[in-house]
Image (spheres, rainbow, N blue to C red):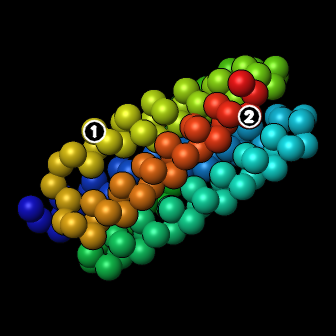
Amino acid sequence: MTNETVIEELNTLLRGTYMGIRSFEHYIQKAEDVELKKVFQSMQQEVKLNAQKLAERIQNLGGVPSDDEGFSGSMHSFMHKVMLPDDTKEMIEDAVKGLDQYGVQYSEELVRGDLDPESRKLAEDVIDTSRRHVEQLQHLYH
């Protein structure tokens, strides 16, 4: 396992984290429920902190961290903003689906590869944040 491999995998996870930050921005802008807006803002802060930790780890491995979600991520972000539902319940369902699909499942596939123990622990912490957010949102309106 080379540092380049680890750096690339962490950068992919970091780009996904930036997509999450951008998605939360869409939810925050569109949410009319003040409490829900606060929940999304709190979650976005946690995701920003994860992005910071990933960027630091990449730098410590001698790499250059991505500074945005990349081209495909920005296309996805644009479509997400256009398609975002107005209904609060549907918005929460959209957030749960996105967090579960990208924040948990896709990220888990990504980190199955070659990561050193410290990078793996960090990646698992990032994924656990998404899991916690899914649970939080599922309890909001169920």
Q: Position of residue 121 (x, y in %)?
A: 32, 63
Q: Residues within 10 Å of mark 1 (few under 14, many from 20)?
A: few
Rendered position, 16 above or below 66: above
Q: Is residue 64 visible?
A: no
Rendered position, 109 above or below 86: below
Instruction: Identify the residue at horizontal 59%, vertical 31% (top origin).
Output: 96
Question: Which mark, residue 125?
Answer: none
Q: Is residue 46 visible?
A: yes
Instruction: Identify the residue at horizontal 82%, vertical 34% (top origin).
Output: 30
Element type at mark 1: helix
- Would you identify the image quadrant in which residue 58 lies? bottom left
Image quarter where the C terminus lies is: top right
Horizontal arrangement in the rendering, residue 127 relative to residue 61 (left or right): right
Q: CA gap, disc 1 to disc 2?
A: 28 Å
Instruction: Identify the residue at horizontal 46%, vertical 46% (top origin).
Output: 16
Comparing labels 1 and 2, the label whose residue is closer to the camera: 2
Q: Position of residue 86 (x, y in %)?
A: 82, 22
Q: Nearer the viewer, residue 133 or 4?
A: 133
Instruction: Identify the residue at horizontal 64%, vertical 41% (top origin).
Output: 136
Q: Position of residue 67 (x, y in %)?
A: 49, 61
Tag 1 and tag 2, C-beta contact below 8 Å: no
- The amino acid marked with disc number 1 is Glu
Q: Nearer the viewer, residue 84 or 49?
A: 49
The numbered mark, 1 or 2, whose residue comes first in the sequence reads 1
Horizontal arrangement in the rendering, residue 127 relative to residue 139 (left or right): left
Q: Which residue is mark 2?
A: 140
Q: Which residue is mark 1?
A: 109
Image quarter where the N terminus lies is: bottom left
Please tell me how many numbered marks the rendered image carries: 2
Element type at mark 2: helix
- The amino acid marked with disc number 2 is Leu
Horizontal arrangement in the rendering, residue 8 relative to residue 27 (left or right): left
